[in-house]
Image (tube, helix red, strand yellow):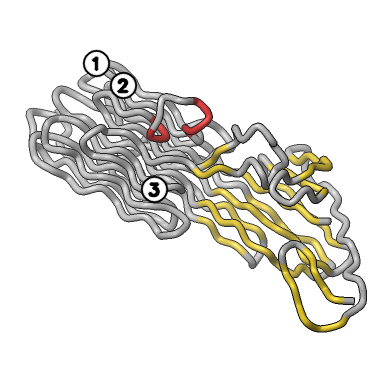
Amino acid sequence: MTRSYLGYVSSQTTDTIPAGIQTWGESSSTSSSITDPSDSKTYNLATYTGNGSFVVTSDGLFELLVVGGGGGNLGGNNSIQFGGGGAGAVIRTIQWLVAGTYTIAVGAGGGNGGGSSSSVGDSTTFSKYLLVGGGGGGGGIGDSDFGSPPNNATWGMSSMGSGGGGTATGNIKRGGYGTKPYGYDGQDGNGSYAGGGGGAAGNAGASSTRNGGAARDISNFIGNATGTNTVGGGGGGGNGGLGGNSSTTALKGGGGNGATSLGTGVNGTANTGGGGGADTGGGGGGNGKSGGSGIVYIRWQ
């Protein structure tokens, strides 16, 4: 028969591909049967919100959707508005997996170490097949007393996922670079005391509006016909940036909102890879907001 499985079509005549079977190594995994609205096919779906093992007993094709941890950022102080955290990378791929055990490590969201490597989200890994970087953090500053702008504000961090937004201190600090098509660039601080939005899985963050980049819709992949499941939203920049480029919850993709006035931003949502929203003015006291952790989806027929 002609081989047609999970979107892969070959002109060769082969035997039927045996179904893979998975077992669970951690309580953080769940299993279900779903129907993809885009092709009306039924799939087994495994979801990992934390570390675990995926055991394949028969060789076969599997679809993977893997999300890295989102980036965090440092809190604002005085007139300094920090950039939103970049989203974790989002990769969808088809892999032929041979029988064996595959180790899954779900990346944590980046912390509040603004301008340092600690603000970059952790990678999510699926054995040797995938290494997915998290998003970059927002910009940080070098002065211990925070002082008056422009200080030593730093650029948004770059990453294998999306870039973090740049800091605004009266002069422009650049947003970090993302790695397309898995993530996009963070935007610059706009020079008017407004931090740049963090990059996202769908597009880049914004500078003029301070909004984080838009998320990526994964509804069909996980069998949600209502179309409300998104991942990889960028964090909003300081001074009112919206996470995920929208105030609509369905489009945020876990990106946190930046504070609208003196106050604290919002953390990225767990298991979405969303970037952390930035603090504004002096409300954060330098605490900052963290990115959301990643997630792994595996499906097969």
The residue under label 2 is 259
The residue under label 1 is 262
| Quadrant housing the C terminus | bottom right
Of discs 1 and 3, which sits in the foreground? 3
The image position of residue 9, as x and y in percent, is: 74, 73
Tell me the CA gap for discs 1 and 3: 28 Å
Tell me the CA gap for discs 2 and 1: 7 Å
The image position of residue 119, as x and y in percent, is: 38, 42
**Contact check, label 1 and label 3, Cβ < 8 Å:** no
Q: Locate residue 44 relative to residue 85 in the image: left or right.
A: right
Q: Amino acid at mark 2?
A: Ala
Q: Residue at x 77, y 68 (%)?
A: 97
Residue 168 sits above or below residue 123 on the image: above
**Contact check, label 2 and label 3, Cβ < 8 Å:** no
Q: Secondary structure at mark 2?
A: loop
Q: Amino acid at mark 3?
A: Asn
Residue 171 image-quadrant placement: top left
Decide which of tag 1 and tag 3 comes sooner along the chain: 3
Q: Residue at x 31, y 46 (%)?
A: 186
- The answer to which of 137 and 218 lies nearer the viewer is 218
